[in-house]
Image (cartoon, grey):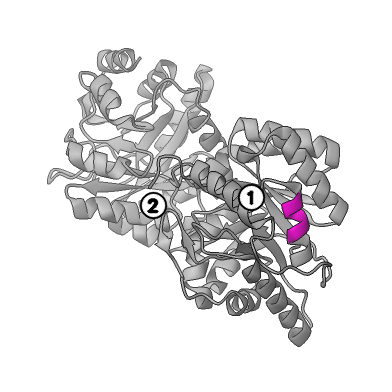
Amino acid sequence: MPKDILKEIIDRRKADIGRLGFCFGCRIPEKRQRAVHPFIAERGAILEVKRASPSKGDIAPSLDAGETARKYAEAGARAISCLTETNYFKGTLVDLMDVCAAVDSFAGSTGKEPPAVLRKDFLLFPEEIDVAYRAGADAVLLIARILSAEELLSMAERCASLGISALVEVRTEDDVEKMSFVMNRVGNGNFICGVNSRDLRDFSVDTLIPAAMLGKIRRAVPGARVAFESGILSPQAAAFAARMDFSAILMGEAAAKNPDNVRSFTDAFGSARAGIGGANWVPLAEEALSGNRKRPFVKVCGITRESDAVLASSLGADFLGFVMWSGSKRNVRGDDVRRIKDALVSSGARVPRLVGVVVDVGGGECADAVSLVESGVLDFLQVHTLASARAFVSDPRLCSLPHYCAVNVASADDVRDALSLFALGEPRVLIDASSRDGIGGTGVRVDGSLVRDFSSSHKLWLAGGISPSNVRSVVAEFLPELVDVSSSLESAPGIKDEGKMREFFSNLG
């Protein structure tokens, strides 16, 4: 794949327009032939007609645009996105017109309001909006990254003059500034913001990117509707986006590959509601991806004493972990966690995010941890072991709580198992060493090649054998977003050593 695929797409698009015109050789009606329908006036899913992509190659090469749109409408899509870019996505303006005809036919035969239709493309000129309007689109995608503020404003004004909507895609603070510039001049009645979890330069995916941008967008444009774009590969992932209070999700690959099975995604997004399971991730995502952090997050795990919690907090720990599992020498109960939190608050120290580490998902200790999260004593659950993680994320009630999963890794198969959790909507997965002596806090390191395999495609949260003596080299080599430390800071299991903790944070920098 080219280093900057977005630039290549734009360069080829400009050449095609110069050669074929704004209609790309397609015959487009001189006048629009259908009514304009509101785009995401209500919360819902946008499902995409998509044959291919630069990152995945062919996805559904034999896809029939009209037939697929009909299936999407029947599955409860609030809107349908149709890719019209030819070189990399194998779409055309003919597909767009076929989709419009299909949703109108759906409305005529069912009496239901049809989904709105979005033209998704790399639009560069206002004349392309005119073409989309004539072809029947109810909305167009405007990518802030590829347009100047003035160009974005001109195209937004053209949308407003035609009475159609725009999905304005933002991904950086500069993009948000452009969006704010436009919305302050045009208003936001016909516009919805979108945040793509996929980086269009290299097509890597990070599903916390939309979460990191959500607060920034709503501070810049109060009341803005915001769509979560790309990376939704399971109903659990759709529900996670809903719990973060997104107005819409846009699904491409997962929908196009399985148009007969998208009802589970639309139902999951429609039934989930904003709550702590998403709300606790939003500020963490903004902090993690702000670009201002000079070191990784630090989680000090295995806390059992008030004094250790207060010291770790004062030294800069970002998370404190409480092991709530009888199989651990560092096991604590709910009353212990409450007592330690009270001591933190009373000390006047900054209170880090508090994490309950659970293993036995069906057991009483997990139930105790769940109640602490629900009452606001704990901020997150860490669900340890692959089997426990899979059981946890398959339970709708548990999965709705703020959590992340931790997997012990000793082989390439273990790495694949850990990576599989991302498809289930997990935004971050902690990898830990595997040892016969226990599932965590063993002081054993993960093999470096396995760490690199994992971190080549996802942000790294790393545990296992990280110590005051090696933390600097671990951070330099692997660039983790979070490091988790426990036994290397102890004088005995569950008893932290002040000197070791001070040395760790001093060496971390």
Name the front one of labels 2 and 1: 1
- Quick check: 101 left or right of 449? right
Q: Residues within 10 Å of mark 1 (few under 14, many from 20)?
A: few
Q: In this view, does 321 lie above or below 310?
A: below
- Residue 306 position, x and y percent, is 39, 24
- Please tell me in which quadrant of the rendered image residue 91 appears: bottom right
Residue at image position (74%, 66%) is: 135
Out of 148 and 118, give the one closest to the viewer. 148
Report the amino acid beneath label 1: Gly
Residue at image position (43%, 49%) is: 368
Report the amino acid beneath label 2: Cys
- Quick check: 506 left or right of 228? left
Can the viewer see residue 276? Answer: no
Residue that extends furthest to the bottom in the rendered view of this protein? 109
Report helix, strand or loop for mark 2. helix
Q: Give the range drawn in magenta.
A: 127-131
Which residue corresponds to mark 1?
A: 18
Marking on residue 366: 2
- Please tell me in which quadrant of the rendered image residue 157 appears: top right
- Quick check: 106 left or right of 235? right
- Residue 145 position, x and y percent, is 61, 38
Of marks 2 and 1, which one's residue comes earlier in the chain? Answer: 1
Out of 211 and 96, give the one closest to the viewer. 96
- Residue 179 position, x and y percent, is 72, 37
Magenta-colored segment: predominant secondary structure: helix
